[in-house]
Image (tube, rainbow, N blue to C red):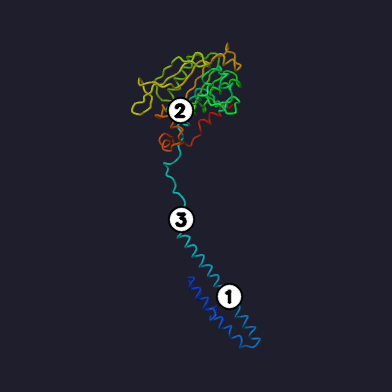
């Protein structure tokens, strides 16, 4: 028995020093192999009587099992350490480094200008009104005093839905004015921003663009109020006290009299900016609401009158921030956004604020 205790002590001492699978295997062979120390001891069992063989044999088997368990435990530990070292040495970093602060997102100029304009109109007492992009013939044409033969109804100007049901992609946000007058009685003072669609594509036209329209209806509104309102909006938006503007007589089926408003601008040296005596760019159409439009909405034109206007948000952005080509607004070029986009501020959206405070959503 003393020899077995010494043997186990020796095995434990050698096991603590075995720091590699090779040394551990040598230890296993030395103690448990065919010529190992445990095997040699077991060979002596044949010279013992039955009682000694039973007692000593059980002790030898127990010592053998203990040494086997210790060797197996040590083997598992060494294999785990080897695997960790291998994983560490062979690891591939599949992560990306964090983007620098200069790569943060930007607010699109259309969104920025929309919020700027809505803030200006909110200060002037206008409410926000919205409507669907897909409109029916009544709200987009008939109610606006546009007859069947009007050019805006032709395929080259308007996107018609394939099902032939008469629905179209709205060509202007004037349809929102009709929906508002149908659901709310005068006095009215609303502004209607949104996407509109026409079959145009060049430097200053795209098939989809952003428009904002305004409508005022009461008993005392005049053309003078219309001109004063628009001039004040342009002064505030462009931050120019003497912004160059001019009004030209025009024709729209839904207003009478009608006018177009131009902004003085320059395109010299590849720049596009507000300037006097350099040229003009049409910025909006406007006029007094046609009596037929008021009648179509159940408003008595003998008692009420009003004015309406509409202009492109994209063109306003082009003028204020010197963007020469409208098509680049919709190309999704991240380099363009880095140049013309706006760094977002941790403030509530002006659009959301207006919509919650008295806005009208149809």
> Residue beneath label 3, please?
92
For discs 3 and 2, the disc positioned in front in the rendered view: 2
Instruction: State the SS at label 3.
Output: loop
- For image coordinates 58% across by 77% down, the residue present is 64
The answer to whether residue 6 is visible is no
Residue at the top extreme, as displayed: 302
N-terminal label among 3 and 2: 3
Residue 160: x and y, percent? 55, 26
Position of 239 relative to 65 (above/below): above
Q: Quadrant of residue 325?
A: top left
Residue 102: x and y, percent? 41, 41
- Inter-mark Cα distance, 3 to 2: 49 Å
Q: Is residue 48 left or right of residue 114?
A: right
Of the 4 image quadrants, the one containing the N terminus is bottom right
Instruction: State the SS at label 2.
Output: loop
As drawn, the label of residue 66 is 1
N-terminal label among 1 and 2: 1
- The local crowd at label 2, few if under 14, some if 14 to 19, many if 20 or more residues have their Cα within 10 Å, is few
- For image coordinates 58% across by 84% down, the residue present is 43
- Inter-mark Cα distance, 1 to 2: 87 Å
> Residue beneath label 2, please?
201
Instruction: State the SS at label 1.
Output: helix
Residue 290: x and y, percent? 54, 14
């Amino acid at each position: 028995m003393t020899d077995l205790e010494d043997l186990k002590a020796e095995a434990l001492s050698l096991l603590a020093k075995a720091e590699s699978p090779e040394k551990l295997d040598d230890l296993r062979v030395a103690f448990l192999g065919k010529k190992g120390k445990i095997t040699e001891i077991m060979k002596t069992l044949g010279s013992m009587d039955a009682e000694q063989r039973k007692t000593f044999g059980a002790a030898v088997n127990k010592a053998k099992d203990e040494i086997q368990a210790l060797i197996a435990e040590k083997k598992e530990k060494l294999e785990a350490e080897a695997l960790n070292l291998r994983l560490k040495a062979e690891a591939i970093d599949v992560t990306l480094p964090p983007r620098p602060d200069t790569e943060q997102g930007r607010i699109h100029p259309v969104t920025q200008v929309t919020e700027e304009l809505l803030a200006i109109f909110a200060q002037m007492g206008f409410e926000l009104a919205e409507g669907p992009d897909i409109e029916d013939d009544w709200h987009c044409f008939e109610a606006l005093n546009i007859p069947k033969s009007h050019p805006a109804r032709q395929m080259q100007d308007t996107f018609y839905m394939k099902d032939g049901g008469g629905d179209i992609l709205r060509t202007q946000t004037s349809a929102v004015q009709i929906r508002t007058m149908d659901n709310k009685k005068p006095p009215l003072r609303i502004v209607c921003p949104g996407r509109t669609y026409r079959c145009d594509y060049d430097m200053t036209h795209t098939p989809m663009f952003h428009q904002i329209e305004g409508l005022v209806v009461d008993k005392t509104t005049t053309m003078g109020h219309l001109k004063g309102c628009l001039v004040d909006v342009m002064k505030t938006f462009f931050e120019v006290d003497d912004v160059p503007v001019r009004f030209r007589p025009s024709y729209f089926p839904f207003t009478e009299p009608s006018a177009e408003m131009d902004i003085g601008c320059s395109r010299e040296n590849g720049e596009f900016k507000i300037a006097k005596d350099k040229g003009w760019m049409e910025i909006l159409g406007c006029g007094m609401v046609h009596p037929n439009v008021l009648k179509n909405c159940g408003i008595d034109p003998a008692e009420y009158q009003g004015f309406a206007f509409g202009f492109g948000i994209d063109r306003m952005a082009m003028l204020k921030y010197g963007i020469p080509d409208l098509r680049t607004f919709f190309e999704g070029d991240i380099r363009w956004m880095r140049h013309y986009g706006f760094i977002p501020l941790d403030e509530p959206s002006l659009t959301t604020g207006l919509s919650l405070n008295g806005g009208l959503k149809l």
